[in-house]
Amino acid sequence: MSSLLMARAIMLLRRFRGSRRGSAAVEFAMVAPIFFGLLFAIIETAFMFFAGQVLETAVQDSARLILTGQAQSAAYSQSQFKTALCGKLSSMFDCNGVYVDVRSYGSDFSTVNVTQPIDANKNFINSMQYSPGTAGQIVVVRAFYQWPLFVTGLGYNISNLTGSKRLLTATAAFRNEPYN
């Protein structure tokens, strides 16, 4: 009787080994985490680049207020200029998280010094200023936003700040027009 059971077990084992039913599900289970991780990383990177472009466009448009002297003539404060900038941003951004830095550098582009406001521990340094300059001066307008990242746990980490965030930076550098 045991040889009969042994023969049946061998026959079932051969049938199981020869069956291909379910192999697609097993293969998909092995490939799916890599596929979905890559897909989510691509989507997150695309959103981040799109947000960076929206911020860049808003800075370019808002910087024209300083370039043409409108902000200086209206005696804009830093918060008023930030409000004008935020009016050009989409709902992708929380305006409370937008930082605006406006600095004037005289009349020579060689004096411009632009550094990232990130310290050695990957913390954001809030040293924002507002100096729109006068006619003919070089001005650099920058806006910063700490963009949250979600796919960093899957081995794709493009964060440059603590807390899984990426600092988006938009910059406009120009010489003020002779608006006086």
Image (cartoon, rainbow, N blue to C red):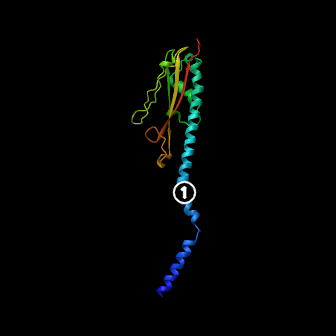
- In the image, residue 6 sits, relative to residue 26, either above or below, namely below
Q: Is residue 115 left or right of residue 175?
A: left
Residue at image coords 57%, 37%: 51
Q: Is residue 87 visible in the rendered structure shown here?
A: no
* Residue 145 x/y as whole percent: 51, 34
Q: Amino acid at mark 1?
A: Val
- In the image, residue 13 sits, relative to residue 171, either above or below, namely below
Q: Nearer the viewer, residue 61 or 46?
A: 46
Q: Is residue 127 visible in the rendered structure shown here?
A: yes
Res 21 quadrant in image: bottom right
Residue placed under numbered mark 1 in the picture: 31
Q: Nearer the viewer, residue 27 or 180?
A: 27
* Residue 70 x/y as whole percent: 59, 18
Residue at image coords 54%, 60%: 29
Viewport quadrant of the C terminus: top right
Label 1 crowd (10 A; few <14 / some 14-19 / many >=20): few
Q: How many marks?
A: 1
Find numbered disc 1 in the image and state the secondary structure of the residue it sits on: helix
